Image (cartoon, rainbow, N blue to C red):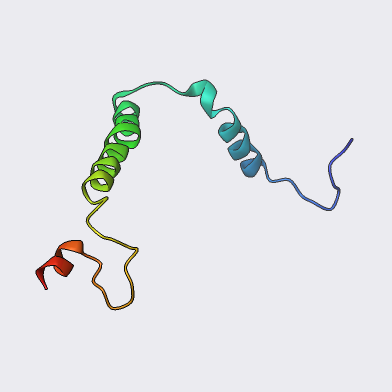
Amino acid sequence: MAGNPLVKEDPAIERWNRMREDAYLHFRWTRRTVQSAVVGFIVVPGIVYYLASKYQYKYDWQQRKGQPLMPSAAKQE
């Protein structure tokens, strides 16, 4: 089945698509890809986990109107 005769194919776009489809075939672990993988899969989630666990109970979002979000501020008054 032939392509649409109203659409003109661009060889550069076809090469780009072919390169993207076959990128996994030409992948190699280099120093740069390992650094990117470590930062993206270990460091960033670690920082997010640390911040989430540190500030998990700092704010109480179940307050009534007019009460402060910080529990320690309510105790001082």
Residue 40 x %, y %: 34, 36
Q: In this view of the protein, which residue sits in the foreground, 43 or 23?
A: 43
Quadrant in which the N terminus is drawn:
top right
Q: Is residue 15 above or below residue 4?
A: above
Can you name the residue that lies furthest to the bottom here? Answer: 66
Residue for point 84% across, 53% down: 6
- Whether 19 is drawn above or below 63: the answer is above
Viewer-proximal residue among 14 and 54: 54
Observer-nearest of 35 and 28: 35
Q: Residue at x 34, y 63 (%)?
A: 62
State the residue lying farthest toward the left: 76
Q: Position of residue 41 (x, y in %)?
A: 35, 33
Q: Is residue 45 left or right of residue 55?
A: right
> Which of the 4 image quarters holds residue 53?
top left
Q: Could you tell me how many numbered marks the image carries?
A: 0
Give the x, y percent position of residue 38: 30, 30
Residue at 33% of width from left, 72% of height from top?
64
Q: In the image, is 14 to the left or to the right of 42?
A: right
Can you say whether 34 is above or below 68 in the image?
above
In the rendered view, would you say 28 is above or below 41? above
Q: Position of residue 71 (x, y in %)?
A: 20, 62
Which residue is at the far right? 1
For the point 84% across and 42% down, the residue is: 3
**Quadrant housing the C terminus:** bottom left
